[in-house]
């Protein structure tokens, strides 16, 4: 068995919250900037109102897809990092609780 570094649950939760909030902040900032940039390009290209809106919508759709793809990659990286910490999962804990319950019942029967 390899030695593991113990991370307290509150520390892990705080770390995950911070990572999530940074990601949300970056995504929101990027969305606003992308939308403004697309509007500026549409204005500079002297597009009609309809064409300008269509262009902004297309750019925003692509930006949303890129954000979604990034979110999936970040989630995969977080899941991988959590697996590497050797922390017990909810399923692991449920199995342990079930085993302890079974042992307690077995011991109670022998008393």
Image (cartoon, rainbow, N blue to C red):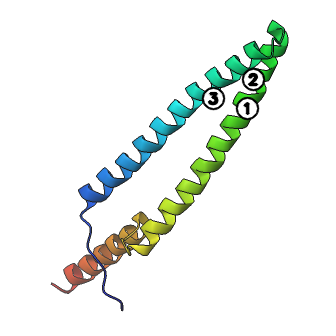
| 3 vs 2, front mark | 3
Q: Residue at x 24, y 55 (%)?
A: 10
Q: Are marks 3 and 2 in contact (CB under 8 Å)?
A: no
> How many numbered callouts?
3
Disc 1/disc 3 C-alpha distance (Å): 11 Å
Where in the figure is residue 66, as x and y percent of width and height?
A: 67, 43
* Circles 1 and 2 in contact, beta carbons < 8 Å: yes
Query: For the point 50% across and 68% down, which residue is it?
Result: 80
Select label 1 or label 3 by which is in front. Answer: 3
Quarter placement of the C terminus: bottom left
Whole-Å distance between the Cαs marked 1 and 2? 6 Å
The picture places residue 13, in percent across and down from the top left corner, at 32, 53
| Residue farthest along the bottom direction in this orientation | 1
Q: Quadrant of residue 25?
A: top left
Structural distance between the alpha carbons of marks 3 and 2: 11 Å
Residue 57 disc label: 2
- Residue drawn at 57 percent across, 48 percent down: 71
Q: Which residue is mark 1?
A: 61
Left or right: 49 as drawn, with respect to 24: right
Mark closer to the chain start, 3 or 2: 3
- Which residue position is annotated with label 3? 34
Say few, some or many: other residues with alpha carbon within 10 Å of mark 1 (under 14 / 14 to 19 / 20 or more).
few
Q: CB atoms at circles 1 and 3 under 8 Å apart?
A: no
């Amino acid at each position: 068995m390899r030695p593991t570094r113990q991370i307290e649950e509150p520390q892990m939760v705080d770390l995950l919250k911070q990572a999530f909030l940074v990601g949300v902040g970056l995504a929101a900032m990027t969305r606003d900037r992308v939308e403004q940039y697309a509007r500026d390009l549409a204005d500079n290209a002297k597009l009609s109102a309809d064409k300008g809106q269509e262009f902004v919508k297309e750019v925003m759709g692509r930006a949303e897809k890129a954000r979604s793809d990034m979110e999936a990659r970040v989630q995969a990286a977080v899941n991988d990092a959590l697996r590497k910490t050797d922390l017990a999962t909810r399923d692991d804990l449920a199995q342990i609780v079930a085993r302890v319950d079974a042992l307690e019942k077995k011991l109670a029967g022998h008393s």
